[in-house]
Image (tube, grey):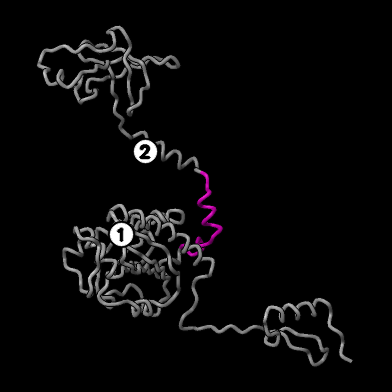
Amino acid sequence: MTEALSQDEIDELLNSISNGEDPSPDMALSEETGKPKRRKRVRLYDFKRPSKFSKEQMRTVSMMHETFARLTTTSLSAQLRSIVNVHVAAVDELTYDEFIRSLSSPTTLAVVQMDPLKGSAILEVDPAVTFAILDRLLGGPGKTLDRTRELSDIEISIAEMIMVRILGNLRESWSQLIDLRPRLSHIETNPQFVQIVAPGEMILLITLEAAIDKTEGIINFCIPYMTLEPIISKLSSQFWYASRNRQTSPENLAQVEERLSKVKLSLVAEVGRAALNLSEIMSLRVGDVIQLDSLAKNPILLHIGGKAKFDCRVGVLDNKRIGIQVIDKTTDVYEIDVDDLIIGGGDSI
């Protein structure tokens, strides 16, 4: 007599049937016991296209470049003074040869040095997007060409300027992961002339959809696996969110303080103010006296970086130079040499 199934086994079979799954590939009845036994799943593996990236790593890359897309949208909108929309369409893993074969010729290929990472990457911009940007920058409405052609030398120079600005957005979007310093090497128009890795090497392809007014196109960012290999362990959601929520360390605060200490601020001593109408200003001559709204014995305000900070009084330093004496009620008295102190319109005392 065949042994009865347990309740757990019955529930598992019912769940498989209710979900529309066929239990036969994964589960079959044992000839000895009559109980279902689970079969091992067989997953096909293509040795020509070895998988290098996990799904979590690809999701992290997608999140990074969503930031890149937003920054690029903002920068291009400001530069072109037009409606621009850029967003991530897909993140795929394929061979370099497949990527090159998928590109049209001619196109705009920017070879990018990924310092401090080794190797190069490729930023490919659809010709429709490229010519729409060029037309807008050169005074046109932002229309693309009906027929694709190669870029002229002048157009390549303008395209290099655009690429450098886009790469600045790339650096900021990667800042949570690494201090990336992307550098434009050169621009090519024929994909067959760009060989950054072997044809069979795996690459990560970030595809972005770009729309400039009514022109739509694709922007591809190709990164070889060998370039990402040193930081592959950081391509995880856990590391990404941890780096974003990381508190400022004392070392970072010391660096910020050191850099701020070298910032130059203007010191402006406001002696007084006067209100004159236009006719009085036009009639001013050398030697005229303007009456201010403050007395000579009253303290004057010292503005630092455009904000009033101290009360002070005018005096002479070393019987030679004019200066001001700053008095702060909560601290000691400080003396500041204002021989070259700038006042309002640029005159010096």
Q: Report the residue at 33% width, 54% height from top.
A: 75
Residue toward you, 323 or 21: 21
Q: Residue furthest right?
A: 1
Q: Report the residue at 29% width, 15% height from top.
A: 324
Answer above or below: position of 317 versus 241: above
Answer above or below: position of 89 versus 177: below
Residue pointed to by mark 1: 183
Residue pointed to by mark 2: 259
Q: Quadrant of residue 164?
A: bottom left
Residue 156 spot, x, y in % from top left: 20, 65
Q: Is residue 28 visible?
A: yes
Residue toward you, 8 or 128: 128
Q: Report the residue at 77% width, 85% height from top.
A: 36
Q: Quadrant of residue 80?
A: bottom left
Answer above or below: position of 94 versus 348: below
Magenta extent: 231-247
Residue 88 spot, x, y in % from top left: 43, 65
Q: Is residue 186 visible?
A: no
Does residue 257 show up magenta in the picture? no
Does residue 235 show up magenta in the picture? yes
